[in-house]
Amino acid sequence: MKNIFNPSHAKEVLDRIDRLSPSSKPQWGEMDVAKMLAHCSAFQDIAMGNASPKRSWSGILIGGVAKPMFYNDKPLARNMSTIPAIKIVDERNFEAEKEKLKQQIIVFQKKGAQECMGRPHPFFGKLTSEQWGKGIYKHLDHHLKQFGV
């Protein structure tokens, strides 16, 4: 499983983000490309400790059991539900969101695994830095595939 803390895996993601354009269309889902980039940035904020959405009741009840789906090598399902706090509904500027996400990935990757050690996910609960690294990569990969890159 790839991990965002691996420099070559982070570079791969950054290169794929650079292949997006304002006219990139989703292969599934409702978000346009700018909203997707903002969604990924909002998720990155959670991992970086810049946002701490409250844990949902469903997460408390089943999050621990479902946790491996976040960091295993099985692709995320299309059109799966998202954390309400990071659902983007307002219009966003593509170039601004693209640059913001790229900078977040660079900072997160350079700060290293200690950046998210034990930080809770709003559904899955506490994650190790390795689980966060794999999960961040998996989440980004899922959305980049959504837009064909």
Image (spheres, rainbow, N blue to C red):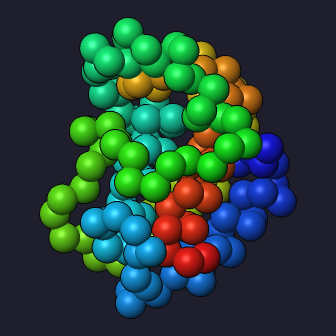
Q: Quadrant of the N terminus?
A: top right
Residue that lies at the very extreme toward the top in this rendered image: 61
Report the number of discs: 0
Query: Which residue is painted at 34% across and 42% down in the image?
Result: 82
Q: Position of residue 52 (x, y in %)?
A: 35, 27
Query: Which residue is painted at 65% across and 68% down in the image?
Result: 14
Q: Is residue 27 visible?
A: yes
- Which image quarter: residue 103? bottom right
Name above or below for residue 105 compared with residue 86: below
The one nearer the camera, 57 or 88, is: 57
Q: Quadrant of the C terminus?
A: bottom right
The one nearer the camera, 83 or 76, is: 76
Q: Position of residue 56 (x, y in %)?
A: 29, 20
Q: Position of residue 41 (x, y in %)?
A: 43, 53
Name above or below for residue 44 compared with residue 33: above
Answer left or right for 144 relative to 82: right
Answer left or right for 63 relative to 110: left
Answer left or right for 81 relative to 115: left
The one nearer the camera, 75 or 149, is: 75
Q: Position of residue 89 (x, y in %)?
A: 18, 59
The one nearer the camera, 8 or 84, is: 84
Query: Which residue is painted at 50% across and 61% down in the image?
Result: 143
Q: Is residue 120 visible?
A: no
- Which image quarter: residue 144? bottom right
Query: Which residue is painted at 37% across and 11% down in the image?
Result: 60
Name above or below for residue 25 compared with residue 115: below
Name above or below for residue 31 compared with residue 128: below
Residue that lies at the very extreme toward the left in this rendered image: 90
